Image (spheres, rainbow, N blue to C red):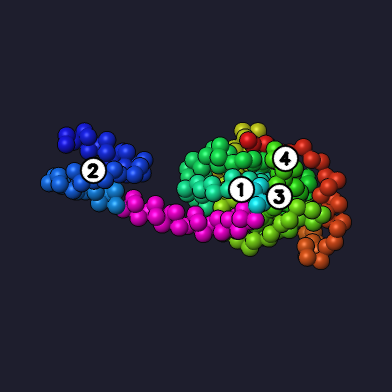
């Protein structure tokens, strides 16, 4: 086999991970060249990786698979991003995957680097039955507190789905007043594929928004740190002051404004339906829809 053919085989059966035909594998095993044998080793390693990834995806789909088996097909995963930043909105995403959908590489967005999240986001949107990303603004965060604002963003994402969900899988949250069956999964972005997919969309959409904010409010470094309370961001607030996108209920921002500390917010488990009512009455025009 010419060397060019070996390079093409590596592209096809290692990089693109296509199944290696039996006859071609026999030819490679009979080829005495070191490059041919190295190619076989790489193909076998890729096979092991795919088997391992297949098992991981089966495990990540155990919640969805159990629900699909009952005849409930439209299972929506929900997750949020941007709870800790000092500036910008909190985002939430809702994703519905068709039964049996497996997207290699999808995992908790915090485990993935920027390039991998950006690679996966359009794949998730393309393969999802429906998806939607929504925001709650800094003003709403200051009014409701960050926990309840994140639930507001989840409600908006849920309302923005083009397909009605029949069951919800939510990362460590419950939505009051929702008649759709729901399941609260602690560390759900690492345990459920649909929640993990939602975590990636919520994170990448919010990150893109923060890059836009960097152009509107230069000097804070929003494009780099996305509003998180890193040292360079706090120092920028000290130099430039507070911009309209900063969360005035967060201590470093209040300190910069010379405002007194806020009293502790009530524990979410101790609050009643008035929090849900506040979510319902907040403006509901911050959603980005997907197919």
Q: Which residue is mark 2?
A: 23
Q: Which residue is mark 4?
A: 160
Q: Residue at x 60, y 45 (%)?
A: 97
Majority secondary structure of magenta residues: helix
Of the residues under marks 3 and 4, which one precedes in the sequence?
A: 4
Q: Which residues are magenta?
A: 45-70
Query: Residue 143: x, y in percent?
Result: 81, 50
Q: Residue at x 77, y 37 (%)?
A: 285
How far apart are the alpha carbons under marks 3 and 2?
47 Å
Q: Is residue 137 visible?
A: no
Instruction: Identify the residue at the far left of this view.
Output: 32
Q: Residue at x 81, y 66 (%)?
A: 270
Marks 3, 4: nearer the viewer: 3
Q: Which residue is mark 3?
A: 166
State the mark number for residue 95. Answer: none
Q: Which residue is mark 1?
A: 198
Magenta span has 161? Answer: no
How far apart are the alpha carbons under marks 4 and 1?
14 Å
Q: Nearer the viewer, residue 80 or 28?
A: 28
Relative to 181, does residue 280 appear above or below in the rendering?
Answer: above
């Amino acid at each position: 086999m010419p060397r060019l053919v070996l390079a093409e085989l590596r592209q096809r059966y290692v990089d693109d991970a296509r199944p290696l035909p039996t006859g071609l594998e026999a030819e490679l095993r009979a080829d005495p060249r070191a490059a041919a044998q190295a190619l076989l080793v790489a193909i076998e390693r890729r096979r092991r990786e795919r088997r391992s990834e297949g098992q991981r995806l089966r495990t990540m789909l155990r919640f969805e698979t159990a629900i699909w088996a009952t005849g409930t097909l439209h299972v929506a995963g929900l997750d949020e991003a941007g709870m800790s930043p000092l500036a910008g909105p909190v985002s939430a995403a809702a994703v519905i995957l068709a039964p049996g959908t497996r997207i290699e590489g999808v995992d908790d967005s915090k485990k993935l680097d920027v390039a991998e999240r950006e690679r996966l986001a359009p794949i998730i949107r393309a393969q999802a039955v429906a998806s939607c990303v929504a925001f709650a603004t800094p003003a709403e965060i200051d009014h409701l507190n960050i926990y309840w604002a994140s639930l507001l963003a989840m409600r908006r994402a849920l309302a923005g789905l083009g397909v009605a969900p029949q069951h919800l899988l939510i990362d460590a949250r419950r939505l009051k007043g929702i008649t759709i069956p729901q399941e609260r999964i602690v560390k759900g972005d690492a345990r459920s594929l649909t929640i993990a997919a939602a975590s990636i969309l919520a994170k990448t959409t919010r990150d893109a928004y923060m890059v836009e904010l960097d152009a509107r409010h230069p000097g804070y470094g929003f494009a780099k740190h996305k509003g998180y309370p890193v040292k360079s961001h706090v120092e920028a607030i000290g130099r430039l002051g507070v911009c309209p996108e900063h969360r005035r209920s967060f201590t470093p921002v209040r300190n910069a404004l010379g405002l007194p500390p806020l009293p502790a917010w009530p524990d979410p488990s101790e609050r009643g339906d008035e929090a849900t009512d506040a979510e319902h009455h907040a403006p509901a025009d911050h959603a980005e829809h997907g197919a």
